[in-house]
């Protein structure tokens, strides 16, 4: 975790790095944005033709390609933006309200 | 060897930037600053200055390009005025918040509407809260010296803040004045190449700047900038003293003229100070004890210094080329008055807005401001409010 804590915890001015620069790379992976979501995408594996367009278009890099070549949603990071059902050519992805899951 | 030359004020700025050996210049031309970047582009094209010159499509991009270049550790310069500065507005805050030691000259120009290419200080005043160090200069010599000092001050580890060097459009851009040029050896000694900070952007050690600021940290982030800006004042004095020891030309937060026994002090910034001094001489010939306090540093605002300097005077008349629409007169007046308000013994502070959109403030107008201020403090005259527009036909 490390650096990510510095932004999420409550540092004093002196503990804060100059200009609050994050000194180590790739810390955003520690910040799970999945809890922003109000709708989640669900993939119908029978309709999915494994073209990978959802994986290409996902702005959050939250589509996982499995070893078998299937696609799954990484719910830790998916913000529920709805781009993947829009791009899916076979309408295999639908958005389901979180409250109903 | 230092030598004295005649030079247009804009070119004095270009020369200082060249001698500061900047790495990146990013600029978009706008009157009345155009001569500055034009001359710099000549320096780059004829090989006198080895810098990257970026022609951008707007001032928003000019400042954004400086931002990126400064973040990797380059010494950067840009110049703008009026609408150009307004277009840069949001990026100014990012440059300061990211602690990037960019130096920018602003050839102060009126804001639209109506379209006015002429000088007043309303452009920088509209962006006064952007977190930059802000200095106002009067003539070629001051512009040249202050730019060199600005880099030294901005890049100091204890500061790391951008600096805006202001001077009145046309009055202090398009005139030719006599100036002493510091030698390149002296400049190189005073201002070595920029030390690249350990956190500068580099592919080998990636860093993230300006990430999300949650409610739990944004206050600390903003206060950190405020503290840095406040602390920069003492370092600026160090730098000005060091420059003074090399060149014999010492600078300070403000510059008094015949204020010792003055009954009224005119307080102003920029090129009008020269006119005001002549007015003071004429007033003194007529037996009116008046003086001028030229303010050089506007941000960080020198409230303590002003309190200790002004506290025993009877009346201070702030004359400025800007105003806050619907607010309390000019920005400078408002802040000078606020600085003094909690003192038990304090002068009366009056504000006079003049010289908008390039209208000259004449010697006799400064004389009448001084007399009016004295009359008011002596109860012989009244003003509807504590501030007023001069020169307006009603």
Image: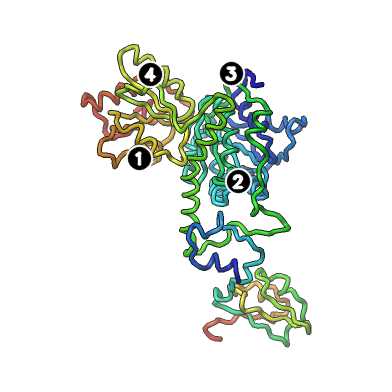
- Quadrant placement of the N terminus of chain B: top right
**Disc 1 from disc 2: Cα separation:** 33 Å
> Where, by quadrant of the figure, is residue B212 drawn?
bottom right
- Please tell me if label 1 and label 2 are on a single chain: yes
Badge 4 or badge 1: first in the primary sequence: 4
Density class for disc 4 (Cα within 10 Å; few <14, some 14-19, many ≥20) is many
Name the spot of residue B68 as percent of width and height, x first: 66, 49
Please tell me which residue lies in front, B156 or B214: B156
Q: Are marks 2 and 3 on the same chain?
A: yes
Callout 2: SS? helix
Tag 3, which secondary structure?
Answer: strand
| Chain for numbered disc 4 | B
Name the residue that disc number 4 marks. Answer: B280
Please, which chain is the residue tagged with disc 2 on?
B
In this view, the residue farthest toward the top is B285
Q: Which residue is mark 3?
A: B178
Q: Earlier in the sequence, mark 2 or mark 3?
A: 2
Disc 1 element: helix
Q: CA distance from mark 4 to mark 1?
A: 25 Å
Q: Is residue B81 left or right of residue B319?
A: right
Q: Report the residue marked by disc 1.
A: B339
Mark 4 vs mark 2, foreground winner is 4
The residue at which mark 2 appears reads as B60
Chain for numbered disc 3: B
Query: Residue placed at 33% from the left, 29% from the top?
Result: B316
How far apart in space, not on screen, are marks 4 and 2 (Cα)? Answer: 42 Å
Q: Quadrant of residue B13?
A: top right
Instruction: Tell me the CA gap for discs 2 and 3.
Output: 34 Å
Residues tagged by mark 3 and mark 1 found on one chain of the structure: yes
Q: Percent from the top left, x then y, of residue B64?
A: 63, 48
- Against B183, residue A15 (above or below) is below
């Amino acid at each position: 975790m490390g650096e990510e804590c510095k932004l999420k915890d409550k540092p004093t001015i002196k503990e804060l790095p100059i200009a609050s620069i994050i000194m180590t790379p790739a810390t955003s992976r520690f910040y799970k944005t999945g809890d922003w979501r109000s709708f989640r995408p669900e993939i119908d594996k029978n309709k999915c033709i494994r073209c990978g367009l959802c994986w290409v278009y996902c702005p959050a890099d939250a589509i996982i390609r499995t070893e078998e070549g299937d696609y799954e949603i990484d719910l830790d990071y998916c913000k529920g933006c709805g781009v993947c059902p829009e791009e899916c050519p076979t309408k295999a992805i639908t958005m389901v309200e979180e409250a109903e899951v | 060897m230092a030598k004295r030359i005649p030079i247009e004020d804009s070119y004095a700025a270009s020369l200082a930037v060249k001698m500061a050996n900047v790495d990146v210049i990013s600029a978009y031309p706008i009157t009345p600053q155009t001569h500055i970047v034009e001359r710099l582009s000549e320096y780059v094209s004829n090989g006198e200055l080895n810098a990257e010159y970026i022609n951008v499509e707007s001032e928003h991009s000019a400042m954004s390009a400086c931002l990126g270049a400064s973040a990797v550790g380059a010494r950067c310069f840009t110049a703008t005025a009026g609408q150009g500065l307004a277009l840069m507005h949001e990026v100014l805050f990012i440059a300061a918040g990211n602690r990037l030691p960019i130096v920018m000259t602003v050839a102060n120009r009126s804001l639209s509407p109506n379209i006015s290419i002429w000088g007043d200080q309303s452009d920088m005043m509209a962006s006064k809260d952007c977190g930059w160090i802000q200095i106002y200069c009067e003539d070629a010599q001051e512009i040249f010296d202050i730019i060199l000092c600005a880099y030294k001050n901005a890049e100091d580890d204890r500061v790391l803040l951008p600096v805006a060097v202001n001077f009145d459009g046309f009055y202090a851009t398009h005139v030719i004045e006599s100036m002493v040029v510091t030698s390149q050896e002296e400049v190189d000694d005073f201002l070595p190449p920029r030390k690249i900070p350990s956190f500068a952007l580099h592919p080998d050690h990636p860093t993230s700047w300006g990430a999300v600021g949650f409610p739990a940290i944004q206050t600390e982030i903003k206060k950190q900038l405020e503290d840095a800006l406040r602390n920069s004042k003492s370092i600026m004095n160090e730098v000005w003293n060091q420059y003074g020891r090399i060149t014999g030309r010492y600078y300070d937060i403000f510059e008094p003229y015949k204020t010792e026994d003055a009954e009224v002090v005119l307080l102003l910034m920029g090129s009008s100070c020269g006119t005001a001094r002549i007015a003071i001489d004429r007033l003194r010939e007529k037996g009116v004890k008046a003086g001028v306090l030229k303010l050089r540093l506007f941000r960080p605002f020198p409230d303590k210094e002003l309190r200790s300097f002004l506290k025993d005077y009877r009346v201070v008349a702030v004359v400025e080329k800007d105003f806050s629409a619907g607010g309390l007169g000019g920005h400078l007046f408002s802040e000078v008055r606020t600085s003094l308000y909690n003192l038990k013994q304090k002068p009366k502070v009056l504000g006079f807005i003049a010289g908008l959109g390039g209208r000259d403030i004449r010697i006799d107008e400064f004389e009448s401001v001084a007399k009016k201020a004295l009359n008011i403090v002596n109860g012989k005259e009244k003003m509807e409010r504590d501030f007023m527009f001069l020169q307006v036909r009603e």
